[in-house]
Image (spheres, rainbow, N blue to C red):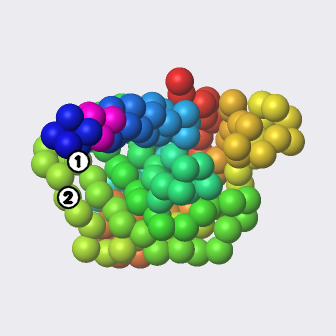
Amino acid sequence: MMTSIFARVMRSAAVLVLGGAALLANPAKAEFVGGGALHGFVGCEAQGWSGTVPVRGRFRPAELLGNPTSVTAFPPHGGAISLMLWHSLGQRSTWVRGRGESVWGRTYVWGQRPRVRMLQRVVTDPPGGSINDAMELTIRMRVRNFNDLPGCQADLSMILYRAG
């Protein structure tokens, strides 16, 4: 009796370990990395945002693995801007509310919930492919209440490649 219970526990542990490893491996396949720019700032002068700011970026679309959509931009002067959205952001999406966070010496959770709209999302490799098959894509999104500044609006444009 003890042997069969022990064997079941060990099999269950093996399944959990292997399943956990698979789950850890899959998010990388659902992630795109690359670069682009923050631009088109309106009403952001109070924080000094203007012109075009180059960024490195990461994008995890909600359609893949059922994750929330997350977008992170890393400006060259340091810091990070991260958006988490519990919606799919397909081509020309409607405005959706999300959660915003920034890192500027410490982590800030935005009190002003950002509103985000995908203006353009195009799979460029393979041309005309779906997000599930995408190896490369371009995105352009508009963010209101950018960086926790009420009324500040910015566009984020990036070219991204599937990681992993």
Q: Mark 1: which secondary structure?
A: strand
- Is residue 136 shown left or right of residue 58? right
> As shown in the figure, which amino acid type bears the numbered disc 2?
Tyr
The residue where tag 2 is placed is: 108
Q: Residue 85's x, y, as percent?
A: 46, 64
Residue shown at the point (27%, 34%) measured from the top left = 7
Of pointers 2 and 1, the one earlier in the residue sequence: 1
- Quarter occupied by residue 114: bottom left
Q: Mark 2: which secondary structure?
A: strand
Few, some or many residues within 10 Å of mark 1 (<14, 14–19, 20+): some
Residue shown at the point (33%, 35%) measured from the top left = 11
Residue shown at the point (55%, 67%) measured from the top left = 87
Callout 2–callout 1 Cβ contact below 8 Å = yes
Q: Residue 27's x, y, as percent?
A: 47, 39
Look at the image and give the residue range highlighted in magenta.
Answer: 7-11
- Quarter occupied by residue 75: top left
